[in-house]
Image (tube, coloured by chain):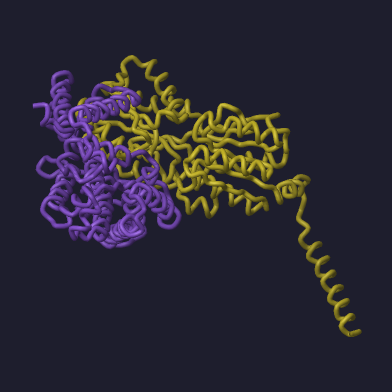
Chain colours: A yellow, B purple
Amino acid sequence: MKTRKILAAAAAVATAIAGLATASLAEPFDDGQSKTYYEKLTGKKVGFVPLSMGFDLTEGWNAGLQNQAEALGYEVTIRDPNWNTEAGVQAANGLIAEQPDVLILHPLDMQAYNRTVQKAMASGINVIQVNLKSVTNGDVYVGTDWYEMGQKQAQAVVDACGEGSGGNGKIAFVQGMLATPTATISGQGAQDVFDQHPEIEVVATQAADWDASKAQAITSTILKQHPDLCGILGLWDGQDIGTAAAIREAGVQDQVFLVTSGGGNQSAACDNIENGNFDAYYSYDVPGQARDLNSAVKILLQTDPEPGSAPFALYTPLKYITKENMTASSCWTLDELKANGG
Amino acid sequence: MLKGLNQERIVGVIAVLLFVGFAIGLPGFLGGANILSLIQNVSILGILGIGMAIGIIGRGIDLSMVSTMVISVAWMLVMVNDGTHLWLAVALAFGFAVIVGLVNGFLIAYVEVPAIFATLAMGIVVYGFGKSFMIGQDVVYLPQGESWFYRIGSGQVAGIPNPVIAFALVALVAALFLKFTKVGRYVYAIGNNVATARITGVPARPVILAQYVLIAVIAVVAGIVVATAVTSMNTRLALSTQVYDVILVVVLGGIGLSGGKGGVRNVIVGTILIGILLNGMTIMNLGYTTQNIFKSVILLAAIVIDTMLNPRDEQTAQHGDI
């Protein structure tokens, strides 16, 4: 009995000494700010409601978010509503009940999350909206300026087909699903540019519903009708792979200039620029957005502002990719991002 | 004279009228190339429609068709991208679809779940299962390859676009199946009256099983045409309303939802009408919503005219539609 007690005491002393030793060894250098930085981030909770997991953008952002969260000791919880707005609102409400420190929303349309954003902020949660924005501002918007995107894409078509280009100015606009903010806002941006260029004739504006087969059908009909078409403005790589297929089938790849946009994923963007499907591509560079997203999260976690008191935006610098300027690092792959993104 | 006008003929007449109208009013509509592209643009809808028709003739329906198409073909592309041999991947994709068809058929024939619920649920199961375990990404891209397989959806033979040929082949095989095989005739018998069919010795349950397997296989064929045409497969299609477009084509062509009636010709007529409409409206550059209004008004008109000319009698009404 006695020996046991002595042994136990000895063990306790040994552990305490060992503990002291590791504690003194692990005391990191503090440059005056780094200690509070790590302390403020550790143990925090971040909620993320994407449109849906499983596609290049959300998977990319998530890879970046998880990398930083793991490195810094906070937690990013995902609720996947799989393209369903109602499920998204429910998921967001569920997260609000769990009181995370920051809530990241990726809204499908401009109205659906308005009240969710307000509710989260009212209960003391900082809100970040990524790549798509509700009408209601959260604390941060990280993502594309869709109006700028429309303008830049339209300008690319104007440069290829407008005055001084040698083109005849006949272009077509393959729209996306009309209710989505990307389609409406980009559409307006593009229209505003075309309005300034009377030499540009938009011979067709048709919605393809983000569906490659529909884009193909529409484009092939337009090309039959206007065999001398000079350019096409498309709004999303996944859809415009169909637009490109119709152009290829009509044998007018050299004549028709196709500009599209997307997250800049290797197989969606660079592979298709390489093989001539797309002539030009505006990328909103998902690794860059992941980095911005992480910055916003870390700023909010450190400063912990009263929700809505100091809103700011980080609009994504757009990357213009063509066959001529493309390099090995123009696009990204998910494996890369998972390994060292964010 | 009006008596002979069934829905198929009414739709045929509407199609001809539209065709003539567009041909006169729209420059460029009547070109041989435009006519071919018109059919090409609806050939996938047509292929799916033929599968759906086989279901509806047997007084069933398959709402899981688009999910089956999307998931099996996307899975095939994933496998090919990961280095699986092309033909093995194709075989596995068909194998997966056959399993889906068997489960559908089993639920409907043996568990006696109404087709509309069984396939509605299966569609969700197939999509969910596929997205969780088989396919990581929403959009899967087609690798570049030399095999003729990659040209099923694009390119042409003797000036006819390959998807049109695929549509024609599927239509031909389905027509032969429905007209001349024993199982095909049984499908009509079951669609007319399943109880009577069983009393007279038709093996109703195995036939229903075969029916849904066939539909799933046709769905994969349609998917292969889609994927090779646009060099990718977007799994989000499974969440779209495409399946209603498919039903629209079938019903528009005059295949009644009460089963036992109609054939491949009806699907072709319905598909071509939709093709003419879409093509003409695209040429006119009509807006998206306007196009939808026209599509539905034409469908309603066809059904209303049919109901007026062929009113329901006691016999056709007793089974009831879905």
Q: Position of residue A77 (x, y in %)?
A: 60, 49
Q: Quadrant of the N terminus of chain A?
A: bottom right
Question: Would residue A33 be found to the left or right of residue A8 on screen?
Answer: left
B205 to B319, vertically: above or below: below
Relative image position of residue B69 (x, y in whole percent): 31, 50
Q: Quadrant of residue A212?
A: top left
Q: Is residue A179 above or below residue A287?
A: above
Can residue A153 be seen? yes
Q: Residue furthest right?
A: A2
Closer to the camera, B87 or B9?
B9
Residue B202: where, in percent of width, then height? 19, 59
The picture quadrant where one finds residue B210 is: bottom left
- Between A33 and B1, the one lying in front of the other is B1
B78 sits to left or right of A222: right
Q: Residue visible at 51% across and 50% down?
A: A337
Q: Is residue B79 visible?
A: no
Residue that protrudes farthest toward the front in the picture:
B314
- Exactly how many numbered labels are in the figure? 0
Up-down: is A274 above or below B19?
below
- Residue A90 location, x and y as percent? 57, 41
- Left or right, residue A276 beside residue B126: left
